[in-house]
Amino acid sequence: MANVSRIEGKLMKQEVFLPDDYRPAEDEPFMNERQVEYFRRKLLNWKSELLAGSKDTIEGLQDGTRNIPDVADRASEETDRALELRTRDRQRKLVAKIDSALRRIDEGEYGYCMVTGEPISLKRLDARPIATMSLEAQERHERREKVHRDD
Protein backbone atom coordinates (compact mmCIF):
# COMPACT_ATOMS: atom_id res chain seq x y z
CA MET A 1 0.00 0.00 0.00
CA ALA A 2 1.21 3.54 -0.70
CA ASN A 3 3.12 5.49 1.93
CA VAL A 4 0.65 7.48 3.95
CA SER A 5 1.27 10.27 6.43
CA ARG A 6 -1.07 12.34 8.55
CA ILE A 7 -1.10 16.09 8.15
CA GLU A 8 -3.68 18.02 10.18
CA GLY A 9 -5.79 14.90 10.66
CA LYS A 10 -5.96 14.16 6.91
CA LEU A 11 -4.39 11.21 5.19
CA MET A 12 -1.91 12.36 2.56
CA LYS A 13 -0.43 9.91 0.05
CA GLN A 14 3.22 10.37 -0.70
CA GLU A 15 4.34 10.32 -4.32
CA VAL A 16 5.82 7.01 -5.45
CA PHE A 17 8.69 7.24 -7.94
CA LEU A 18 7.97 5.09 -10.96
CA PRO A 19 10.40 4.98 -13.91
CA ASP A 20 8.75 5.26 -17.34
CA ASP A 21 9.94 1.77 -18.28
CA TYR A 22 8.74 0.11 -15.03
CA ARG A 23 6.82 -3.16 -15.37
CA PRO A 24 5.65 -5.21 -12.37
CA ALA A 25 7.81 -8.31 -11.89
CA GLU A 26 7.11 -11.63 -10.20
CA ASP A 27 10.35 -11.39 -8.19
CA GLU A 28 9.24 -8.36 -6.16
CA PRO A 29 6.73 -8.31 -3.30
CA PHE A 30 3.15 -8.57 -4.61
CA MET A 31 1.27 -5.25 -4.70
CA ASN A 32 4.20 -3.26 -3.35
CA GLU A 33 4.03 0.54 -3.66
CA ARG A 34 5.46 0.57 -7.18
CA GLN A 35 3.07 -2.10 -8.47
CA VAL A 36 0.09 -0.33 -6.91
CA GLU A 37 1.16 2.98 -8.42
CA TYR A 38 1.75 1.33 -11.82
CA PHE A 39 -1.79 -0.08 -11.90
CA ARG A 40 -3.31 3.16 -10.54
CA ARG A 41 -1.70 5.12 -13.37
CA LYS A 42 -2.68 2.49 -15.94
CA LEU A 43 -6.32 2.65 -14.80
CA LEU A 44 -6.39 6.46 -14.66
CA ASN A 45 -4.89 6.75 -18.18
CA TRP A 46 -7.40 4.20 -19.54
CA LYS A 47 -10.28 6.08 -17.92
CA SER A 48 -9.01 9.38 -19.30
CA GLU A 49 -8.88 7.94 -22.85
CA LEU A 50 -12.42 6.57 -22.56
CA LEU A 51 -13.81 9.85 -21.25
CA ALA A 52 -12.07 11.83 -24.01
CA GLY A 53 -13.64 9.50 -26.58
CA SER A 54 -17.06 9.97 -25.00
CA LYS A 55 -16.68 13.72 -25.19
CA ASP A 56 -15.83 13.46 -28.90
CA THR A 57 -18.90 11.28 -29.47
CA ILE A 58 -21.23 13.70 -27.71
CA GLU A 59 -19.84 16.61 -29.73
CA GLY A 60 -20.17 14.57 -32.94
CA LEU A 61 -23.76 13.63 -32.17
CA GLN A 62 -24.64 17.24 -31.42
CA ASP A 63 -22.99 18.46 -34.62
CA GLY A 64 -24.42 15.56 -36.62
CA THR A 65 -28.09 16.44 -36.21
CA ARG A 66 -28.76 17.55 -39.75
CA ASN A 67 -31.52 17.03 -42.24
CA ILE A 68 -30.62 14.28 -44.73
CA PRO A 69 -33.20 14.12 -47.53
CA ASP A 70 -32.24 10.68 -48.89
CA VAL A 71 -33.99 7.92 -46.92
CA ALA A 72 -31.17 5.39 -47.39
CA ASP A 73 -28.52 7.91 -46.28
CA ARG A 74 -30.62 8.87 -43.26
CA ALA A 75 -31.08 5.18 -42.31
CA SER A 76 -27.35 4.60 -42.65
CA GLU A 77 -26.62 7.63 -40.45
CA GLU A 78 -29.10 6.41 -37.81
CA THR A 79 -27.50 2.96 -37.83
CA ASP A 80 -24.06 4.52 -37.35
CA ARG A 81 -25.35 6.64 -34.46
CA ALA A 82 -27.00 3.64 -32.78
CA LEU A 83 -23.77 1.65 -33.05
CA GLU A 84 -21.77 4.56 -31.64
CA LEU A 85 -24.18 4.92 -28.71
CA ARG A 86 -23.99 1.18 -27.93
CA THR A 87 -20.20 1.39 -28.01
CA ARG A 88 -20.25 4.37 -25.66
CA ASP A 89 -22.64 2.56 -23.31
CA ARG A 90 -20.18 -0.34 -23.08
CA GLN A 91 -17.41 2.16 -22.40
CA ARG A 92 -19.54 3.83 -19.69
CA LYS A 93 -19.82 0.44 -17.98
CA LEU A 94 -16.07 -0.02 -18.37
CA VAL A 95 -15.45 3.35 -16.67
CA ALA A 96 -17.57 2.13 -13.73
CA LYS A 97 -15.38 -1.00 -13.51
CA ILE A 98 -12.25 1.17 -13.64
CA ASP A 99 -13.64 3.31 -10.80
CA SER A 100 -14.31 0.14 -8.83
CA ALA A 101 -10.71 -1.03 -9.39
CA LEU A 102 -9.41 2.38 -8.25
CA ARG A 103 -11.55 2.06 -5.09
CA ARG A 104 -10.05 -1.39 -4.46
CA ILE A 105 -6.58 0.17 -4.79
CA ASP A 106 -7.48 2.82 -2.20
CA GLU A 107 -8.84 0.13 0.12
CA GLY A 108 -5.78 -2.13 -0.29
CA GLU A 109 -7.81 -4.92 -1.92
CA TYR A 110 -6.61 -4.52 -5.50
CA GLY A 111 -4.89 -7.48 -7.13
CA TYR A 112 -6.54 -10.12 -4.97
CA CYS A 113 -9.23 -12.51 -6.19
CA MET A 114 -12.66 -11.62 -4.78
CA VAL A 115 -13.55 -15.35 -4.69
CA THR A 116 -10.42 -17.02 -3.30
CA GLY A 117 -8.52 -14.08 -1.80
CA GLU A 118 -5.40 -15.28 -3.62
CA PRO A 119 -3.24 -12.87 -5.67
CA ILE A 120 -4.29 -12.40 -9.30
CA SER A 121 -1.32 -12.93 -11.62
CA LEU A 122 0.54 -9.80 -12.67
CA LYS A 123 0.25 -10.85 -16.33
CA ARG A 124 -3.54 -11.02 -15.99
CA LEU A 125 -3.71 -7.66 -14.20
CA ASP A 126 -1.47 -6.06 -16.81
CA ALA A 127 -3.69 -7.38 -19.61
CA ARG A 128 -6.96 -6.67 -17.79
CA PRO A 129 -6.37 -4.23 -14.91
CA ILE A 130 -10.06 -4.36 -13.91
CA ALA A 131 -9.92 -8.12 -13.22
CA THR A 132 -11.53 -9.11 -9.93
CA MET A 133 -10.87 -12.84 -10.10
CA SER A 134 -7.86 -15.05 -10.69
CA LEU A 135 -7.84 -16.84 -14.03
CA GLU A 136 -8.86 -20.13 -12.37
CA ALA A 137 -11.77 -18.54 -10.48
CA GLN A 138 -12.89 -16.72 -13.64
CA GLU A 139 -12.85 -19.96 -15.64
CA ARG A 140 -14.90 -21.75 -12.93
CA HIS A 141 -17.35 -18.83 -12.91
CA GLU A 142 -17.73 -18.95 -16.70
CA ARG A 143 -18.21 -22.75 -16.69
CA ARG A 144 -20.98 -22.44 -14.06
CA GLU A 145 -22.55 -19.59 -16.03
CA LYS A 146 -22.51 -21.69 -19.20
CA VAL A 147 -24.10 -24.67 -17.43
CA HIS A 148 -26.91 -22.48 -16.07
CA ARG A 149 -27.44 -20.87 -19.46
CA ASP A 150 -27.75 -24.24 -21.17
CA ASP A 151 -30.49 -25.37 -18.75
Image (spheres, grey):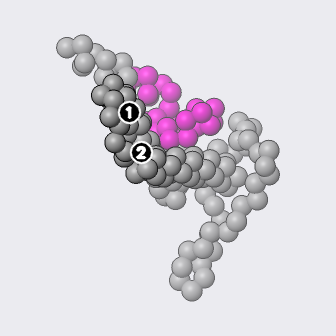
Looking at the rendered image, the quarter that the N terminus falls into is bottom right
Look at 33% across and 29% down and name the residue there: 70
Where 81 sits versus 150, above or below?
Answer: below
Look at 60% across and 82% down and name the residue there: 7
Q: Which of 119 and 52 is in front in this view?
A: 52
Looking at the rendered image, the quarter that the C terminus falls into is top left
Q: What secondary structure is found at the residue carrying circle 2?
A: loop
Horizontal side, residue 13 vs residue 94: left or right: right
State yes or no: discs 1 and 2 in contact (Cβ < 8 Å).
yes
- The label on residue 64 is 2
- Nearer the N terminus, badge 1 or badge 2? 2
Look at 63% across and 32% down and name the residue there: 123
- Farthest residue in the front direction? 69
- The label on residue 77 is 1
Horizontal side, residue 147 vs residue 3: left or right: left
- Farthest residue in the left direction? 151
Which of the 4 quarters of the picture holds residue 3?
A: bottom right
Q: Give the range drawn in magenta.
A: 114-141
Counting other residues with Cα less than 10 Å from the Cα at mark 1, is it few (<14), some (14-19), or many (20 or more)?
some
| Type of the residue with mark 2 | Gly
Q: What secondary structure is found at the residue carrying circle 1?
A: helix
Look at 50% across and 32% down and name the residue there: 134
Q: Where is residue 75 in the image (x, y as percent from the top left)?
A: 32, 29
Q: Nearer the viewer, residue 121 or 60?
A: 60
